[in-house]
Image: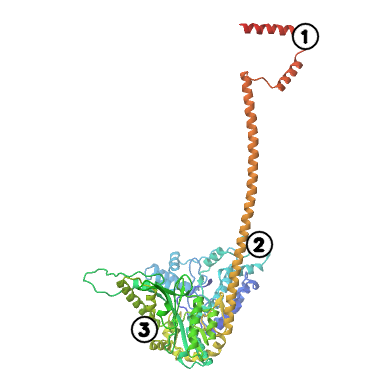
Amino acid sequence: MQILAATPPASDCVPSTSTLSTLTAGAAHVSFLALSQAPLHGSLGLSWVHTCDVHILEHFSPFPPLLSPCPIVGHATMHRKATSTPSAGTAGVSSVAHETMQVTMRTVKAGGMTVESFASRFNMSYDRARYYIHTGGVAKRRGPAPFFSAAEEALLAECIINNATIGRGLSQEVVCRVCAEYLADLSAERQAAARKLFGGTLKPGRSWVKCFLSRHPELRRYRAGTREEGRARNGRPEVVASWFSILTLLYRDYRVTSPRQVWHMDETHVQAQTSAMSGREGILGGVGMVKPEIILPAFASGAGACTAVFCVSAAGVVAPHCIVVDGQTPGHAYVSETEADGSRTEQALSSYLNDGAVVWRRSPPGFDKAVFDVCASTFATFARSYFPDEDKILSLDGAKVHLSTTGLLTLLKARVHVVVEPSKMSHILQALDNPSAFGRYQPRVRRRVREIALECREAGRPFNTPELMRCIARAASEALTVDALTTAFRRVGMWPLDPTVVSTAELSKGADATVQDVDLAKLTQRLMPRVRKDMSRPVVVNGTLSTAGRGTVLTAPEIMAALDETAAAKVAAKALKQANKRAHDQRADERKIKDAAAAKVKRAKVEAKEAETRGVAWVDIGSEASHEAGCRLRMMGLALPVAAKTRRRLAAARLRVPPVSPRVLWRVVASEAVRVGGQRQM
């Protein structure tokens, strides 16, 4: 998450307890509630804040001569960076400092000092120093404020710095929301202007924040972690001491008086094929070979990689191994072997390991809660037969795959109490994860894999899973000896219980601040009352049990109940997600059916309309064709007019021609008949 805070210089300092308490008390006056209570647009509210807070911290940390005094900001943890740049103006720099910078700038222009030296002296970046020298240090105002006044923005920047200083850093969204809450208490005119500027809402957007940061160079973005993560990373002495406090309390509660009662479980991955291919084997050859190479055998399916789980005690006893190999069907792993007579027999891969070992199939050959349940059942069976009347302490790392209530309950029934180590501390607190345990095992298993791979090459057979099991068994028997395991537990201080074996150099490795000399034994004793309450108190973060900076007893009733609740919540969330998906799919199917029906109706309407249009067009075409044909026939004299038309013509002729006597009419007809008869004879 990104927050806004002041830009620290290279010389940060760690605050003391008194300074932090004073800072917290002073910062209470500059809360964001003041944005809605104090008159920010006037000078009265600002002068009250300055007067109240400057005197609180003035006597604790005097200001540097070249930096301007700013109330509360940065006196406990960081100093303010000089902001005397042309883009930011010189309002935050005193007159004496400005004169000093002007004199030094003239020295730079004369060639007596470099720009880098100028930037380093006045604690500014190279770009700002160069720009300052280029413009001659002319003071300019910080860009136009689009809505808020300069006093309001100054108070907002001050509040952002104060909250970041006391561990309450504000993100960009929170700053925008605070501005919206402040605007909601202003007048209607200011709210109308804000809505007009911010797109109809009172909440500013990212562009406003970007411009705000450009006007205030004392602010910058940070990608900050949580306080708990910082404590887990930097508070290593306290974390280590709390771990030994838990072990002391468990040893006392369950009467752990022998090293055979202290156990540790851890897993490691074996890359057989990678080890054989990347490992460089020494060979003998003639002089002049440029790049000698060797041929490796083929690796059978399931023999390329596996996960080995080991459980060892402080007395040097190794519990039955639990190996996870590649296999599609979960279950115990078997291998088929062909005898000399051609018959095939099935043999369990666990027969190549120590007594009681288990080889489990899983694809890919990794670790999950189901595999942890198998390993827990295997160790519980061993624990019931190995001093069954004694309670045993089993330490694990805080991986999520170990948070299975089924496996933990199986171990608890066998009187095995499980405790997880603080996260990110395995290199210091785990017995198997040190040079005396896995530091001896892993080189041996890689060397053994290369040796057997060469044997398989000479014999002309592939590297099968039984060969991998032989490599693991041989390497474990050679590396995990009694002396090696007792040394491993002694180096991490688990048995005998000794917090002083952890050196300050190990505690300082990877920390932001170097750990000074600390008495871990005394700190362990003082933390016991608090650890007694915390070791069985579950802390759930993002739906899973958190072990950041603290050890936890997994077999405690409160922890088991919390694990059940988180598992039930995950199952319920998964079921709800599946139900929502099914409902979404059902709605999608119904929508598809409805859309298909609507499309069918629409298509039927379109087809009917097209059919109607085609019918009308055919009628028009037919009538036009028949009319054109009749006209052509009449023009050729091959067709007479229709009867109705003839009747209409006769009626019209009667109306136009006056009536004549039949005698005259007969004379006309006779003369016409004679004329026609004469034409035919010719």
Is 241 situated above or below 612? Answer: below
Quadrant of the rendered image containing residue 557: bottom right
Q: Nearer the viewer, mark 3 or mark 2?
A: 3
Q: Callout 1: 10 Å neighbours few (<14), some, many (20+)?
A: few
Q: What residue is disc 2 on?
A: 192
Q: Residue at x 39, y 67 (%)?
A: 109
Tell which circle, 3 or 1, labels the residue nearer the N-terminal end: 3
The amino acid sitting under disc 3 is Glu
Disc 2 from disc 1: Cα separation: 106 Å
Question: Between disc 3 and disc 2, whose residue precedes?
Answer: 2
Q: Left or right: where does residue 285 sit relative to residue 526? A: left
Q: Nearer the viewer, mark 2 or mark 1?
A: 1
Where 398 falls versus 630 (above or below)?
Answer: below
Q: Nearer the viewer, residue 414 or 32?
A: 414
Q: Which mark is residue 662?
A: 1
At mark 2, the secondary structure is: helix
Is 440 or 508 nearer to us in this picture? Answer: 440
The three-letter amino acid code for the residue at tag 2 is Ala
The numbered disc on residue 335 is none
Q: Percent from the top left, x then y, of residue 151?
A: 59, 70
Q: CA distance from mark 3 to mark 2?
A: 80 Å
Q: What residue is pinned by disc 3?
A: 478
| Label 3, label 1: how far apart the Cα atoms are | 151 Å
Q: Where is residue 529 shown, x and y percent of the image?
A: 55, 90
On-image quarter of the C terminus: top right
Front residue (pair 627, 382):
382
Q: Residue at x 30, y 74 (%)?
A: 281
**Which amino acid type is shown beneath numbered disc 1?**
Pro
